[in-house]
Image: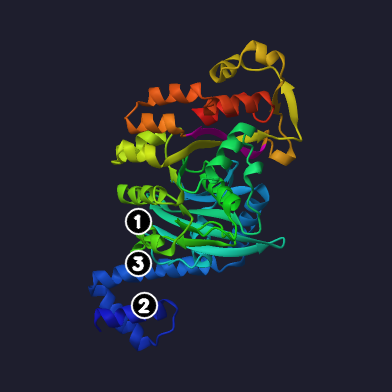
Amino acid sequence: MNCDQARTEIIAYLKNEVDLTARKRLEEHIAFCPNCRHELEGARRLLSWTEAASQEAVAEKVKELIINAIAAGASDIHFEPQRDTELQVRYRVDGVMHEVDRIDPTQRHGVVTRVKMLAEMSVSETSVPLDGRLMMTHNDKDYDLRVSSVPFVFGEALVLRIFDRSASLPGLDRLRFSESDLEQIRNWLGQPNGMIIVTGPTGSGKTTTLYSMLMEVNSPEHKIMTIEDPVEYVIPGVNHAQVNVKAGFTFAAALRSFFRHDPDVIMVGETRDLETELLALRAAITGHLVLNTLHTNDAIGAIGRLTDMGVEPFLVGASLIGVMSQRLARLICRDCREPVDADAGALGYLGITSEEIAGNAIYRGKGCDNCRHTGYKGRTGVYEVLTIDKDLASMIGNGATYSEILEAAKAKGFRTMREDVKRKVLDGITTPEEATRVLV
């Protein structure tokens, strides 16, 4: 027996589906072949995991964890292997992680394998990152779960990101912009060309804001095209495309193709390199309205990021019409909200004066069943919105510094994110502690 023949019989051998002669022949080969012996141990381990994944108790546990996450309003489920061979399970609710369970060693591999099987991922591959997807229906709602696995020191970790396919996307008027900020954004979207940039860290709600902008301009008179990785929502009337790096369909390749389709509006899900950014800027100055994202700490920082990437300042000034930055802050639970004495340190950090406190109560949530005793339920955006007018465009083109642009913008009424979240604290929307957490 050679190695190829041995490999084809290993699974049947483990399932006791070979006759005595074949069993003896395989065992003799394995005794002298370390490679096949290693494959036998791997196959035995894999067979054990798949059998465990098929157990009713494991299937029910996975289903229960997913349903409970949906009921809790979680955006993600995290399965994380621990040193003690347990599997920690955490939900991310309103941007904050909460431990909800620990899977004992007897079910650990079965649970991980069960999720991978449902997501149509290779259960035999545990040494490289994998991606998968599964669909489920609960309470007459359709959910799309994007699954990612990463091998760590103590085993494979999984993250399931939950998307409610039946949830309607919010319009701009539901994102809690101030009246002046909303007016500015709508003025940007009314322009025939130019670039709008939305900045913020991962998980700050940039995608939701971009989709809300697309809904604002979506009409039979506009041809809208997007390139994303991945496509998170599909808007009727919008042409969505998804990056496929293996096939060579990158952000840059998509943009080059888009020019031949005569779009009015282009959305670029993420700018990762200079080539993509230059193509997007070219589109913005040649008759297209371009929506784009960057990872920067604030709105003005996006200007420096573009020049750091290698974009000439004059091109930045000529193409930008607006930049906004955002974070997500947790909302005080409406069921257990109560006025409290304010913490002087937190208020001082936010720049809230004693005179301002005198006319406004400071609120917190004391915790109840509705908010899982956290005092918070839901999230709201915290924003800074910067319109690039002729004066600022000229300054950018001439290489003005961050401080110079900030000073000029404030003279024109620009409000920083700190000022926006301060107003939300005084309005009783969020707490001083949450506002501080968002800004730090």
* Mark 1 and mark 2 residues within 8 Å of each other at the beta carbon: no
* Mark 3 and mark 1 residues within 8 Å of each other at the beta carbon: no
- What separation in Å lies between label 2 and label 3 (alpha carbons)? 35 Å
- What separation in Å lies between label 3 and label 1 (alpha carbons)? 13 Å
Query: Looking at the picture, which amino acid does disc 3 mark?
Result: Ala
267 in relation to 51, above or below: above
Boundaries of the magenta span: 377-387
Residue hosting label 3: 247
Q: Nearer the viewer, residue 60 or 219?
A: 219
Please, what is the dominant secondary structure of the magenta stretch?
strand
Residue 315: x and y, percent? 34, 41
User: Dot 3 surroundings within 10 Å: few (below 14), some, or many (20 or more)?
Assistant: few
Asked whether 383 falls inside the magenta stretch, the response is yes
User: Dot 2 surroundings within 10 Å: few (below 14), some, or many (20 or more)?
Assistant: many
* Mark 2 and mark 3 residues within 8 Å of each other at the beta carbon: no
Q: Sequence order check: which comes first, mark 3 or mark 1?
A: 3
In the drawing, what numbered circle is on residue 252? 1
Query: Looking at the picture, which amino acid does disc 1 mark?
Result: Ala
Write down the quadrant of residue 12 in the picture.
bottom left
Q: Sequence order check: which comes first, mark 2 or mark 3?
A: 2
| Foreground tag (3 vs 1) | 1
Residue at horizontal 71%, vertical 35%? 333
- What separation in Å lies between label 1 and label 2 (alpha carbons)? 46 Å
Residue at horizontal 41%, vertical 48%? 284
Residue hosting label 2: 10
Q: Is residue 200 visible to the viewer in this orientation of the structure?
A: no
Asked whether 369 falls inside the magenta stretch, the response is no
Q: Secondary structure at mark 3?
A: helix
Residue at horizontal 66%, vertical 55%? 167
